[in-house]
Image (spheres, grey):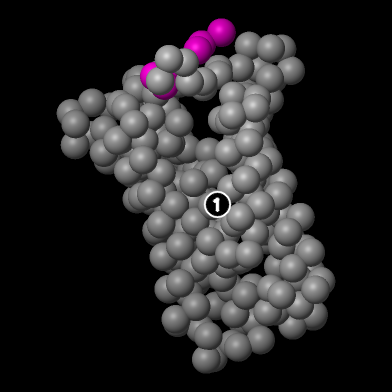
Amino acid sequence: MTAARILSIIIGYLFGLFTTGYFYAKHMHVDIRSMGSGNIGTTNTFRTLGKKAGILVFLGDGFKGVFAVLLVWLLFRERYPDGIKILEAYAGLGAVLGHNFPVHLKFKGGKGIATTAGMMLAFCPWAVPVCLLLFVLSIFVKRYVSVGSLLVCIGFFIQTVVFGQNGILGAPSFTLTEIYIVVGIVCVLGLIRHQSNIRRLLSGTENKVFVQDGQEEHQKS
């Protein structure tokens, strides 16, 4: 199944190369990399190009993870029924790698949270409600998108292990260790890509998102 693992990562990576924020901004005749934080992901798009752009980019980046996992499932579910969850995990990893390190942008991509969320939806949908709740609460309580993103990564990994151990994930026990490792890598990538945010959180200079007088505003420290 080694070849299937490699192919799953490649399929995911190719999906990940559709850098929605970059292409949307290019369609608007601007370069998102020269705006705001310079990141091509949802948060920077939302801050620099508006709510509509942010939503579209989130959906586009999220569905990359969904489609990568689903395509691998369609291709290999009959040939590798006992290993299909492993291959799905590799597809999700590939999609995140493609988004974070796109070859056409000199490997300078986003932080992969929307794509990770899409992977989660297709790979382990039972983890979505808790992660969504954590993200929403972090926005309304802490007013930091970065905190929500970090909690999503941590929550996704923990729930994958819990559901795997309880049999809800639907993977044979002998495949669980590898699945945990791959999902762990995805989540660690999300944490690593937020290093600068973590430093700003610790220093109290992280950007906040808050609602005031019915208007969404962004505060830059």
Q: Position of residue 23 (x, y in %)?
A: 27, 40
Residue at horizontal 72 percent and vertical 55 percent from the top: 157
Residue, x 52% and y 91% (percent of image)? 78
Q: Position of residue 30 (x, y in %)?
A: 23, 26
* Residue at the far front in the pictured view: 213
Whole-percent x, y for residue 25 in the image: 26, 33
Judged left or right of residue 214, residue 154 is right
Residue type at mark 1: give it. Thr
Give the residue at mark 1: 116
Vertical position of residue 135 compared to residue 51: above or below = below
Q: What is the magenta range? A: 215-221
Taking the magenta stretch, the answer to whether it contains residue 59 is no
The residue that appears at 69% across and 73% down in the rendered structure is: 169
Q: Could you tell me how many numbered marks the image carries?
A: 1
| Residue 205 visible (yes or no) | yes
- Most extreme residue toward the top, as rendered? 221
Q: Nearer the viewer, residue 7 or 37?
A: 37
Q: Is residue 208 above or below residue 10?
A: above
Of 215 and 173, which appears nearest the observer?
215
Position of the C terminus by quadrant: top right
